[in-house]
Each structure stands twice: as structure tokens, then as C-alpha cells.
Image: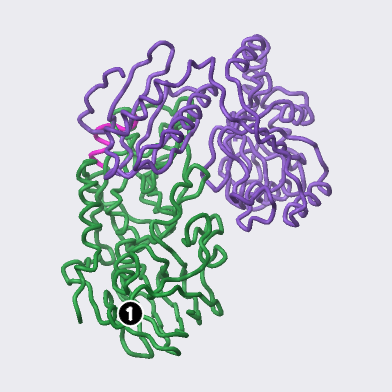
Chain colours: A purple, B green
């Protein structure tokens, strides 16, 4: 273990470990008497950090010391909930750092990652209803709303031909669920194919109402709203329930939450409103069968080779996108 | 069985420590907002301190007993009466079949009161807890607040009724609640995104000296405080977003002070579990109960900085205080 610096006078940073042999540095931040925040690398958007985080999450769970209650992974950090009277912070930091340093080399990481297929209806009646209410009660002149949808705006902002091309992009990539949170079961998912990595600014002001099952994007992140709620993401599609507190379908037997961190989401098939409505009904009847590959794993080395192979195309899309965005107003 | 004749403003079944270990799935722990009063109410009637009881917010609850039980009411004064006779707070009583326990609305300081019944409320645990988590519609009775006509099953008492009635909490352990327009002192440590990386030293000095007004739009998910003009250590949130309060999303500690734009919001026990705003402080776990007794729209908060070690000591002291040994015969 490398040596760590003394705590700052304010006691915010409890320990730091510098970058070493390509392994990103770690900062341990005080988060009160029951939590510890562990951050990796710099504050930049790097999806590959999530693989390290989930690899560490898995290692911590396998070697769980007494007093450790839970690990809450996010894109570039884990928050640890622990009983500080049983497990002092200093010992917890030593434990986590040892697990981190024992992770296999990044290229050799293979993490458990289910593939979850979800049907999708684009610019469906539920989404249109939420947008119509926003126009009526909140903001009539929002530039992100064109013909009662956010999808046309999303296409323009990313320099895509039309909303149909935007929908193709959504379906053409798998989405990496880096974390669950905010509401029960809400995924924070990022596109694994950088050639299809759309970005969209948020609503302004945020929407008062979004129906459960709505799919939205803000920045590079895709979310599915598990419960009826307020929201700030641009919305353009609907899917089957991902949260059922009444656990009416076998997919919810173990937990009312369908998704897990490290899942890959794949949107297929594309369905009509009527077909989706029948599927939602079948979820609650218990007859709908969610399509989930439970045993799939994710090979980080293979993915990094894929990233290398599409680097130029991805760069070209990013430039095209950035150029298009300059011609589109921000909400 | 306990029969609900009037659910009041907002009454829920809660247990302590709630649904822990599920933050990574997006579930806040729920549980009582004032766990100090809640646990003492349970101890008074001979229950384990975390047994399921009722959280009565603002008042209005009316319940009828269908069997003989010990009960205790701890927390804010809502002029509770058993068959019309005044019920003292922080004291255990006997209820007989047919007895009616009524709560009025707030009489003065405090905002929530807790009813513990010997044997506890025996609704089925959901995901390991009986606590009602309203945003996720789980736990308690069908994941919702109580209403007239609800019937709450009760568990088997652990001890004989005679042993646990007519007991009271030692007077020096009964907290004084700050009144309307008064200031609550709340112990807190600096949070993961305080100074010097996210806020300036001056920002943090202001945070720990200001008297923050608790906004009327506050509930079990979050306690909104007044907008403040922070200096900020950064000019933008970088990859997290345009505003210097933005970060790349991370997990939120329960009890964190989450600064969204310029508004600090204390994330309470039903609050969001993950998000992209900084947390500049975290309320000491041993001080979380105070939030439960503040009155939205009226109370003020002064955050008193404590170290991690001090926060842990406070917690140990609190757990020791809530015990049978600190009860007296009436």
C-alpha cells in the first residue's frame, strides 16, 4: 500500500493515493459518521471508470468486513455505508485501498453484466401527454419542444437527419447502467458505442410531471423513470415497468427493482403504443416475460479494443455533434 | 389490532433503522424522522427499540384498541387523550379493549409524535423492514399513510403488561424542543464536497454560523433552507454541469446537506440516494432526530461543526441513553 497524506485541517479529505502504474488515484472523503466517499481519477466523464468501480464493488462485497453495511457505486466513485463504531474509518480505508490495489489489471477485468432487453415505443402517447402538460402549465415557448416532442430537438442538437435517425441511434447501442438511484430502481445508463453517444441539455425549468416508464436523456446519460415524478431529462420514449412495489411479475419476485448496476440495457423491439400497453398489462398479470441474459459478463479488454477500432468514427461524430449544437438554442 | 378512526394529517408505520442496505437500488432507509422519541416510546412499553410504531406528523390521529396493550407517546405535544383523559408524553399506559386514543394538533414546539404499542405493529416486512417509504410506495400499510378504516395487526408482547405500564423517561433525558421562530442547534461534520475544493473557507464559515430558515416546502425527503450567495471555489461544475454546485453524480449520505444551485437542502431519511450536486456537510446521525421536531416554515437551524470522532461519540452516548435503566416508575 502506498502511503497516504495527513488529513487536511478541515478534515474533508481523509486520505489520498496518487495514480500508480496506470491505476487512477483515489481520494477518500469524509461523509459523516456513517458514510465514506471514495473517488477515482479526475472529475472527467470517462465511462471506463465505471468498470473499475463495479469491479471494486464486487471485490468489496466478496470480502465484506464486519461493520460494512453497503457499497453504493456511481460512475467514478463509491459511497460506503458503514457502522463506524464497529469498523473505524481508518481500517475501512485500508481495507478498500487493499481491495482496489488487488484488482486485476484493467485489461483483464471481466465483470458480471446482465443484458436486459426492453421494448420501446418512441414519441408515445404518455410522453406526448407529459410534454403537452408542460407546454400548457409551465412553459409554452421552450425551444426543446418542437411539434409536441423533444425528439426533433434532440435530433437537431446532435446534427442528425431527423427524429427517426435519433431513434435509430438509441436502438443501435447498448446502454451501460453505471448506477441506480435517486428514485428506487432508476438507472443512470451511458452509451457503450461512442459513435452513437448523443448528448442533450436538460429542461429549464424542470418538468412537474413525468409518467412512470418514460425514457429520457440529459447530457450523455439515459434514465428510465421508475415512478411518476418531476424530471429534467428530455423525454422521447416509453417502456415496460422497471419498478413494481407490488411485485406482480416473476421478474420482480426477488426485488421490486428490475435493474442492477452493471446491467447492459438494449432497446428492442420497437413497438406501437397499443403493443406496449398490452405488454404493460401483461407485466401486471404476471404473464409478460422480461428478456434478461442473467449469466452474461462484460470483458473490459475486448471493449477497449472495440473503442480503439472506432476511435476515428467516434471523434468525427463528436465534432459533427459539437458543430450542430452551436446552431441550436439551449432551453 | 389497532383500528384507525382518523388518519390525521400524515401518520405512517415506521421501524428503526428502516430499510438499510438498499441505497444502491435507490431506496432511502425511511424510518422515524425523530428516532430518539421513537426508540424511547418502544423501550417504555417493553419492545425492542426499533419495533414498528406510528409516526404522527402534525396530529389528528384517532385510534381504537381492540385488546389490552401497553402504549406510550413520545415527541411533540398533540394533547393526546385516552377516553378523554389527558395522556402524558414520555410515559407508558394501559389501554383496554374499546379504549380510544385521540390526538389533537400541535400544541406548541415540535412537529411529530410517536405511538408505540406493546408487541409492535405487525404489518408484513417488505424488503426487510416495516418502515413506510412513501416515494417508493413500499412498507407500512400498502406503502401509504394511514386513513380511517385501516386495521393494524399487533405483534405478541415480549413481557407482561404489568411490568411495563406506568413508567416514565427520566426527566433529564426528555429533550426541550426549540419553539416557533427559535433556533435548533444541529451537530454536523464537514461533507465530502466542502472546502477547499468545492467551497471556499468563507463559504463554510458562513454555513456554520448562519441561522438557516427551514422552508415550508420541507418534508421527509428534504428540508429546504434559504438561498445563499456562495463564493464557490470553482467557476463551473466541469464535466458535472454548468453550475459550480454540479458534480458527476455520486451517492448521497443520508443526512447530507446537498447544495443545489444556491439552495442547501438537507436530505432526510426518504431523500434521493444519488445525484449530481455537492454535499458540503453531513448532519451527525445522533442529531438527525432534531430534524423530526422542526416546524417547516418556522424553525431555524444553526449547524454546529463537530469532528468525525465527536459525531461517533454522540451516537454512542445516545444509544446508551435509550435504555430500560433510564426509566422510572410513575
Question: Which residue appears at 25% of the width and 82% of the height?
Answer: B166
Residue B199 lies in magenta, yes or no?
Answer: yes
Total marks drawn?
1
Is residue A243 or residue B238 the one in the foreground? A243
A184 lies above or below B87: above
Residue B321 visible from this viewpoint: yes
Majority secondary structure of magenta residues: helix
Residue bearing mark 1: B160
Q: Position of residue A304 (x, y in %)?
A: 59, 15
Is any part of residue B178 visible from this angle?
Answer: no
Secondary structure of residue under mark 1: loop
Please say if A66 is above or below A161.
Answer: below
Q: Is residue B114 left or right of residue A158?
A: left
**Horizontal and vertical percent position of residue B100:** 42, 87
The chain letter under disc 1 is: B
Q: Please identify the quadrant where the C terminus of chain B is shown.
A: bottom left
Q: Residues within 10 Å of mark 1 (few under 14, many from 20)?
A: few
The answer to which quarter of the image holds residue A33 is: top left
Quadrant for residue B97, please give it: bottom left
* In the rendered image, the vertical position of residue B110 relative to residue A194, given as above or below: below
Q: Is residue B324 left or right of residue B268?
A: left
- Relative to B202, A116 lies left or right: right
Name the residue at 59% across, 51% down.
A229
Which sits in the foreground, A314 or A2? A2
Does the magenta-highlighted stretch encompass residue A329?
Answer: no
Q: How far across and down, in percent of the image, does residue A99 sit?
A: 40, 26
In the picture shown, does residue B10 fall above or below B227?
below
Give the residues in magenta.
B198-206
Amino acid at each position: 500500500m502506498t502511503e497516504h497524506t495527513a488529513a487536511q485541517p478541515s478534515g474533508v479529505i481523509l486520505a489520498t493515493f496518487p495514480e500508480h502504474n496506470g491505476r487512477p488515484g483515489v481520494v477518500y472523503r469524509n461523509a459523516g459518521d456513517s458514510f465514506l466517499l471514495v473517488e477515482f481519477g479526475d472529475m472527467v466523464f470517462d465511462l471506463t471508470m465505471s468498470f473499475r468501480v463495479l469491479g471494486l464493488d464486487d471485490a468489496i462485497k466478496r470480502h465484506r468486513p464486519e461493520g460494512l453495511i453497503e457499497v453504493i457505486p456511481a460512475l467514478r466513485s463509491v459511497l460506503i455505508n458503514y457502522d463506524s463504531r464497529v469498523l473505524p474509518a481508518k481500517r475501512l480505508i485500508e481495507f478498500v485501498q487493499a481491495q482496489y490495489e488487488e484488482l486485476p489489471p484493467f485489461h483483464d477485468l471481466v465483470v458480471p453484466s446482465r443484458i436486459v432487453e426492453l421494448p420501446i415505443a418512441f414519441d408515445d402517447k404518455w410522453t406526448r401527454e407529459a410534454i403537452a402538460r408542460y407546454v400548457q402549465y409551465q412553459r409554452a415557448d421552450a425551444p426543446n419542444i418542437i411539434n409536441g416532442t423533444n425528439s426533433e430537438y434532440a435530433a437537431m442538437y446532435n446534427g442528425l437527419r431527423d427524429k427517426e435517425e435519433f431513434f435509430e441511434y438509441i436502438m443501435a447501442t447498448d446502454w451501460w447502467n453505471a448506477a441506480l438511484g435517486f428514485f428506487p430502481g432508476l438507472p443512470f445508463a451511458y452509451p457503450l458505442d461512442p459513435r452513437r453517444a448523443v448528448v442533450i441539455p436538460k429542461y429549464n425549468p424542470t418538468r412537474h410531471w413525468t409518467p412512470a416508464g418514460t425514457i429520457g436523456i440529459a447530457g450523455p446519460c439515459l434514465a428510465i423513470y421508475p415512478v411518476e415524478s418531476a424530471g429534467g431529462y428530455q423525454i422521447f420514449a416509453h417502456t415496460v415497468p422497471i419498478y413494481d412495489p407490488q411485485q406482480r411479475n416473476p421478474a420482480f419476485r426477488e426485488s421490486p427493482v428490475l435493474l442492477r448496476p452493471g446491467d447492459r440495457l438494449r432497446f428492442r423491439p420497437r413497438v406501437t403504443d397499443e403493443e406496449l400497453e398490452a405488454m404493460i398489462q401483461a407485466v401486471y398479470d404476471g404473464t409478460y416475460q422480461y428478456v434478461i441474459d442473467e449469466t452474461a459478463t462484460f470483458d473490459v479488454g475486448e471493449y477497449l479494443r472495440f473503442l480503439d477500432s472506432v476511435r476515428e468514427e467516434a471523434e468525427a461524430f463528436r465534432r459533427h455533434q459539437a458543430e450542430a449544437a452551436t446552431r441550436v438554442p439551449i432551453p | 389490532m389497532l383500528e384507525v378512526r382518523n388518519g390525521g394529517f400524515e401518520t405512517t408505520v415506521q421501524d428503526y433503522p428502516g430499510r438499510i442496505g438498499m441505497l444502491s437500488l435507490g431506496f432511502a432507509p425511511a424510518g422515524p424522522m425523530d428516532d430518539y422519541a421513537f426508540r424511547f416510546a418502544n423501550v417504555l412499553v417493553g419492545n425492542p427499540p426499533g419495533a414498528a410504531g406510528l409516526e404522527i406528523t402534525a396530529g389528528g390521529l384517532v385510534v381504537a384498541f381492540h385488546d389490552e396493550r401497553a402504549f406510550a407517546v413520545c415527541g411533540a405535544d398533540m394533547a393526546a387523550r385516552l377516553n378523554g383523559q389527558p395522556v402524558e408524553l414520555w410515559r407508558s399506559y394501559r389501554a383496554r379493549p374499546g379504549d380510544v386514543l385521540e390526538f389533537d394538533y400541535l400544541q406548541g414546539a415540535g412537529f411529530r409524535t410517536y405511538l408505540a404499542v406493546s408487541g409492535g405493529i405487525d404489518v408484513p416486512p417488505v424488503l426487510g423492514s416495516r418502515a413506510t417509504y412513501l416515494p417508493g410506495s413500499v412498507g407500512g400499510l400498502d406503502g401509504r399513510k394511514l386513513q380511517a378504516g385501516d386495521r393494524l395487526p399487533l405483534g405478541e408482547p415480549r413481557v407482561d403488561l404489568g411490568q411495563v405500564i406506568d413508567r416514565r423517561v427520566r426527566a433529564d433525558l426528555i429533550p426541550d424542543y426549540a419553539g416557533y421562530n427559535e433556533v435548533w442547534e444541529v451537530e454536523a461534520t464537514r461533507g465530502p464536497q466542502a472546502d477547499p475544493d468545492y467551497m471556499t473557507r468563507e463559504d463554510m464559515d458562513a454555513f456554520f454560523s448562519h441561522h438557516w430558515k427551514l422552508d415550508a416546502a420541507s418534508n421527509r425527503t428534504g428540508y429546504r433552507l434559504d438561498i445563499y450567495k456562495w463564493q464557490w471555489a470553482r467557476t463551473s461544475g466541469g464535466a458535472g454541469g454548468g453550475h459550480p454546485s454540479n458534480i458527476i453524480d455520486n451517492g448521497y449520505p443520508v443526512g447530507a446537506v446537498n447544495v443545489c444551485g444556491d439552495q442547501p437542502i438537507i436530505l432526510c431519511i426518504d431523500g434521493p440516494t444519488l445525484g449530481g450536486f455537492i454535499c458540503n456537510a453531513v448532519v451527525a446521525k445522533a442529531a438527525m432526530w432534531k430534524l423530526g421536531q422542526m416546524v417547516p416554515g418556522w424553525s431555524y437551524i444553526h449547524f454546529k461543526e463537530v469532528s468525525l470522532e465527536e459525531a461517533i461519540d454522540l451516537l454512542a452516548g445516545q444509544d446508551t441513553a435509550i435504555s430500560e435503566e433510564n426509566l422510572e416508575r410513575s
